[in-house]
């Protein structure tokens, strides 16, 4: 899909999308990464609007898919995700995943919005990524759109404002729901995640809202945008575009 379908704006908006680096699940012992649709679906929505998109990760370099999110995976779990299949089949687009920018090298002033993608790796890596927390705080305090979806919302749990107040305290957000964690645990036969976003957010004084499990759902609270799970990537992108006003 062309990145210049809509060229109505003289200066296209610039989006920084952050995905997790590869890691190993401490609960299951298998490799974890980012969820394909949570990066690719919003990427397609942004580029179709004429925005420029930069991919970044805490450590920079190559990022890897969660296996079940890969439409080519033998499990067939995401076989119907044709957008991701097309992206991954294109050498030009797939190459974007091989060389992401390091978060610490990204400057708030170079972008109009930041979007944190989800997947399994964020739950094991984002809690200990202070450069990512600082970047998100920088975007928000600069008055810029700050977004996250699914397990990427975990990063927001650790972001504090200048006075030490948690960024999301008193805000309305969504993210991977307890109802979905229950289903994931039942499918695997044991606890999948080291903690639950919904529980942690509520302890911070957040109004955490969800739709029924596996339904597209995203919510905008001012310039803070969040999405529930892997079916919500495009919805998050649409709310970011709405917040940017073009």
Image (cartoon, rainbow, N blue to C red):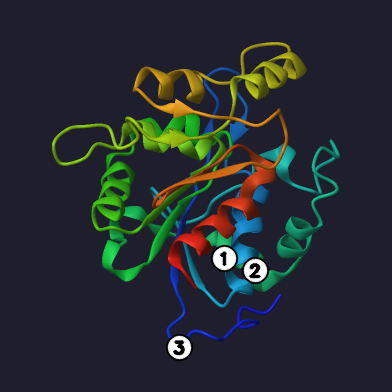
Q: Position of residue 244 (x, y in %)?
A: 44, 65
| Circle nearer the viewer, 3 or 1 | 3
- Which quadrant would residue 32 be assigned to in this image? top right
Please tell me which of labels 3 and 1 falls first in the chain.
3
State the residue at coordinates (64%, 41%): 217
Provide the secondary structure element on which disc 1 rests.
helix
Residue 15 in view in this figure: no
Judge the density around disc 3: few (<14), some (14-19), many (≥20) Cα neighbours within 10 Å: few
**In the rendered image, which residue does mark 2 sit on?**
93
**Which disc is residue 96 wearing?**
1
Are discs 1 and 2 less than 8 Å apart at CB? yes
Q: Which residue occupies 56% across, 21% down? A: 193
Can you give x and y, in whole percent of width and height, for residue 54 in the image? 47, 66
Q: Is residue 164 something one can see in this rendering?
A: yes
Q: Position of residue 182 (x, y in %)?
A: 67, 16
User: Nearer the viewer's eye, disc 3 or disc 2?
Assistant: 3
- Taking depth in this image into account, of 3 and 91 the one nearest to the observer is 3
Q: CA distance from mark 3 to mark 2?
A: 25 Å
Pointer 3 residue: 10
Element carrying mark 3? loop
- Quarter of the image containing the N terminus? bottom right
Q: State how far apart marks 1 and 2 are (Cα).
A: 5 Å
Taking 33 as reference, is 146 above or below it?
A: below
């Amino acid at each position: 899909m062309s990145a210049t379908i809509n060229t109505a704006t003289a200066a296209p908006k610039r989006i920084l999308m952050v995905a997790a680096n590869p890691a190993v699940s401490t609960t299951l012992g298998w490799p974890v990464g980012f969820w394909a649709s949570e990066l690719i679906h919003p990427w397609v929505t942004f580029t179709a609007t004429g925005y420029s998109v930069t991919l970044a990760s805490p450590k920079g370099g190559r990022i890897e898919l969660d296996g079940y999110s890969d439409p080519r995976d033998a499990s067939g779990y995401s076989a119907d995700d044709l957008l991701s299949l097309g992206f991954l089949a294109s050498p030009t687009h797939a190459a974007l995943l091989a060389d992401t920018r390091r978060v610490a090298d990204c400057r708030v002033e170079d972008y109009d919005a930041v979007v944190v993608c989800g997947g399994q790796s964020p739950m094991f890596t984002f809690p200990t990524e202070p450069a990512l927390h600082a970047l998100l705080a920088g975007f928000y305090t600069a008055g810029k759109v700050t977004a996250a979806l699914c397990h990427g919302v975990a990063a927001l749990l650790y972001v504090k404002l200048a006075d030490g107040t948690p960024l999301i305290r008193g805000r309305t957000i969504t993210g991977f729901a307890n109802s979905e964690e229950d289903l994931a645990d039942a499918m695997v036969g044991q606890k999948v995640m080291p903690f639950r976003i919904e529980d942690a957010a509520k302890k911070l004084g957040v109004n955490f809202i969800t739709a029924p499990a596996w339904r597209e759902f995203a919510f905008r609270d001012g310039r803070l945008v969040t999405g529930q799970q892997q079916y919500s990537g495009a919805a998050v992108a649409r709310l970011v575009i709405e917040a940017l006003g073009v």
